[in-house]
Amino acid sequence: MDELVVLCTEDGTPAGTAPKLEVHTERTPLHLAFSAWLFDDAGNLLLTRRALTKLTWPGVWTNSFCGHPGPGESFEDAVVRRAREELGTSVTGIRVVLPNFSYRAEDASGIVEHEVCPVFFVQIDGELNPNPDEVCEYQWVNIENLREAVKRVPFIFSPWLVEELGQFPG
């Protein structure tokens, strides 16, 4: 069965559902998503490189993981679920840092992401075992080094990572 995404209004109010594969097109309607930034005990951030088989932004470096809450699923439950599905790990300390983040970006293929997408910081609570259908590489980085890399070569990162990082304090 195809994953359902929650369609929404500009303020994030749910307004129906649609199959994920039918939603992500060149005319993607606004829908709910989330973005998660995973940190280790030393304060390093996990960057992931999207699998080369991904429909959108294949091979692009991005934040730790993202996903869509299902109908009736809380953002926190969706974060826990996607950490397990995408990275094969568990997380703790889930905290929203950009509750009102939203963006629209178009991939080189013409497919659009158009999301109300709260951003969460989470703490790793287990070993990593990334799903190769989602992640082809990963790297633990210092967030200040990431800021410098984004200034120098923003095009190697996902557009949502660049926008989110630009909204974090300090």
Image: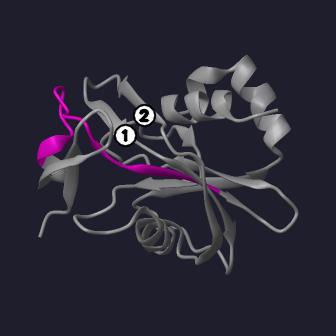
Q: Is residue 114 left or right of residue 126?
A: left
Magenta region, residue range: 22-37
N-terminal-most mark, 2 or 1:
2
The residue that label 2 is drawn on is 102
Question: In front: 46, or 94?
Answer: 94
Q: Is residue 94 left or right of residue 65?
A: right
Decide: marks 2, 1 in contact (CB < 8 A)? Answer: yes
* Occupied quadrant, residue 62: top right
Q: Is residue 153 magenta?
A: no
Name the residue rendered at 57%, 22% in the picture: 155
Residue 164, how many percent across, how many down? 59, 34
Question: In front: 5, or 53?
Answer: 5
For badge 1, the amino acid type reads Val
User: Mark 2 and mark 1: span between their CA atoms?
Assistant: 4 Å
Quadrant position of the N terminus in the picture: bottom left
Q: Tag 2's secondary structure?
A: strand
Residue 32, how many percent across, how many down? 31, 48
The residue that label 1 is drawn on is 116
Residue 117 sits above or below residue 17 on the image: above
Mark 2 packing: few (<14 Cα in 10 Å), some, or many (20+)?
many
Residue 63 sits above or below residue 140 on the image: above
For badge 2, the amino acid type reads Ser
Quadrant position of the C terminus in the picture: top right
Name the residue rendered at 44%, 51% in the picture: 34
